[in-house]
Image (cartoon, rainbow, N blue to C red):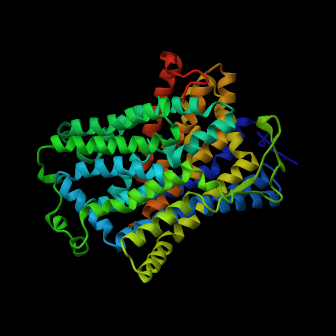
Amino acid sequence: MFQQILAPVGGSLGLSFIVAVLPVLAVLTLLGILRRPAWEAALAGLAIGLIAAVAVWRMPVGLAADAVLNGAVFALWPVMWIVLSALLLYNIAVKSGRFDAFRAWLLTNLPNDRRVVLVVIGFCFGALLEGVSGFGTPVAITSSLLILVGFPALEALVFVLIFNTAPVAFGALGVPVTVLGAVTGLPAHTLAAMIGRQLPFIAIALPFYVMALYGGRRSLRALWPLLLVAGGSFALSQFVSSNYLDYALTDVLSALGSLGATLIFLRTWRPAPDPEFAIDASILNVQAPTRTVASWQGWLPWLIASVVVILWTHFGVFLVGEQKIHWPGLDNAIAITLYDNRPYAAVWVFQPLTTGTAILISAIITTLIVRLSLADFIACIGQTLRQAWLAVITVMLIIGLAYLMNYSGMAYTLGKAVASTGHLFVFLSPFLGWVAVLLSGSDTSGNALFGNLQVVAAHQLHFDPVLFAATNSSGGVMGKMVSPQNIATGVAVTRLKGQEGVVFARTFWHSIIVTLALSIIVAAQQFLFPWIIPTLGVGR
C-alpha cells in the first residue's frame, strides 16, 4: 500500500506546500496572465502534477496513471453527460424557436432595460438552472440569452459567472451537502442549516455587486428596490429552505421564490427609462420563428426539465441500475496519512439513469411536444457535440489533475499547511474550498476532498466544526466562478471558445473579493456571533 507523504521536500511542510501548489499556479498563470485556452492550462497543470507526484511525492507511475484515468472517467460520467444533455436541450430550444420565444417573452414582459434583464436572467433564472443541472450549463444558457438582448459576449459571461455562486452549494438537489455530511460524520441537515446562514449574506449582495460593475452608482440608485427584492427574496428563501424545509430543494425553492417575487414586483414598479441601457430597437423586432410560436412557450423546455429532474430525484430513479465499480489497482491501494492511514477508496459510481439522463429525457419530451423533426433532433445532437468536444477534453484534464493531487497526497499537503496556520486559518478556510472547486469544478468534489480536513483543523484550534465544514462548501462556490470546467462549458455556445483565459482574467479578482468577504463573515460568526452556529442535530 502506497503511504502518502505530507512533507516530502526535506521534511518541511512549508517547502512541500510550495511544490504542491505549482500545478495550481501553472493553471492560474496560463489562464489569467498568458490568457491561454483552458485545455492548454489544464494540460500543463496535469503535466507538472504528474512530475511532482511521481518524482517528489514518490507515487508509483501506475497509481498516478490510474488516478488521472479515474478522474477523467468521472469527468465523462456523470459530469459532462449532464452538460451534454443540458446543451442538447438548449439547442432544441433554439432549433424549435422556443429560445427566441423566451427572449420575446422577456422583451414583452420586462421593462426595456438591459439591467433588469441581467438581474432576472443572470441571477434568478440562472439559479433555477443551477438547481436542476449545474456544471456550467447555467452559465452557457443564461449568457446566450443576455447576448441575444444586446450584451457583449465577454460581459455576459463574466456577469453570469459571478452570479453563479450563491446557489452552487445546494446545486443538483443538495448533493454537495449530502457528501459533506458523509465525509465529516456531521448531520447533513445541520451543515445545510449553517451554509444557509452564510450564503444568504452573499446572495443579497450579489445583485448590487454585479450592478455596480455593469451600471455604476447611477444604476444602483435607480434599481436598488429591484436589487433588494431579487437578492433579498433569494436569501430569505435560501435560509428558510435550508434551515426549516428540505435542503435538497433549497436551490429550486430559492430560485423560484426570487424569480416569482422579482417578476411580481416588476408588475408594480419599474425603473425610470434610461436610454443608455435600453435594448436596441432591432432586437425588439421578434424574429420569424417566434411569429408562429407563442412567447409563453419559451418557458417549456426549462419547466419540463425542472419537473422531470425533481421527480427523478424525489422518486430515486437515478438509483436504478447503479453500479459501484472499484477502480482496479487504485481502490484502497493508498493510505491517507493525514486521516490515520485510512485506506483511500476509489469507487466509480456508475448510474445509467443519472441526472444527465433525466435531462436527456426532458430534451426528448420537449422535442415531441414542440414537434421537432427527427432530422432536426439529430442535427441538434451534432451541434451539441461540435460545441462541447473541447470542453469535454478540458474537463477530463482538469479533473484528472484534481484526482492526481488527491491520491498522491499533494492536496493533503496543501490542506495540512493551511490548517497549520493557527488562528489565521479562520480567514484561509474558505480558500481551501475555493482551490478544490477551482480544480474540480464541483462543490461536491471539493467537500469530499477537504470537508473532513476542515473539521480536524477546527477541533485542533478549538473552533466550531460545523462552522468550518460548512465554510468549505461556501468557500468552494466562489471557486466555481473561475473553474476552467465552468468557464469552458460557458464559452461553448459563444464566440469566445478558446478565449477562456480572457474570461478567467476578468473574473479572477471578483472571485477573490467575494471569498474574502466570506472570510470576514466566518470570522464574525466564530468570534462575534457564535450563537448563529446551529447546534448538532438542528435542521429538518
Q: Quadrant of the C terminus?
A: top right
Whether residue 53 is situated above or below residue 165 in the rendered picture: below
Pick out the residue farthest to the front. Answer: 315
At 77% from the left edge and 42% from the top edge, which residue is drawn?
A: 9
Whether residue 259 is situated above or below residue 501 in the rendered picture: above
- Residue 246 visible in the shown view: yes
Which quadrant of the structure image shows residue 509?
top left
Pick out the residue farthest to the right. Answer: 1
Which quadrant of the structure image shows residue 138?
bottom left
Locate residue 217 relative to residue 208 in the image: left or right: left
Q: Where residue 242 appears, x then y in whole percent? A: 49, 34
Locate residue 451 relative to residue 306 in the image: left or right: right
Which quadrant of the structure image shows residue 55?
bottom right
At 48% from the left edge and 57% from the top edge, which residue is drawn?
A: 308
Whether residue 279 is situated above or below residue 539 in the rendered picture: below
Q: Where residue 146 appears, x then y in whole percent? A: 30, 58
Instruction: Name the one closer to the observer, 194 or 267.
Output: 267
Locate residue 189 relative to residue 142 in the image: left or right: right
Instruction: Name the one closer to the observer, 326 or 425.
Output: 326
Instruction: Name the one closer to the observer, 274 or 189.
Output: 189
- Residue 37 visible in the shown view: no
Q: Where residue 114 appears, x then y in whole percent? A: 22, 53
Q: Where residue 153 appears, x then y in whole percent? A: 33, 61
Number of numbered labels in the structure image: 0
At 50% from the left edge and 46% from the top edge, which residue is drawn?
A: 171
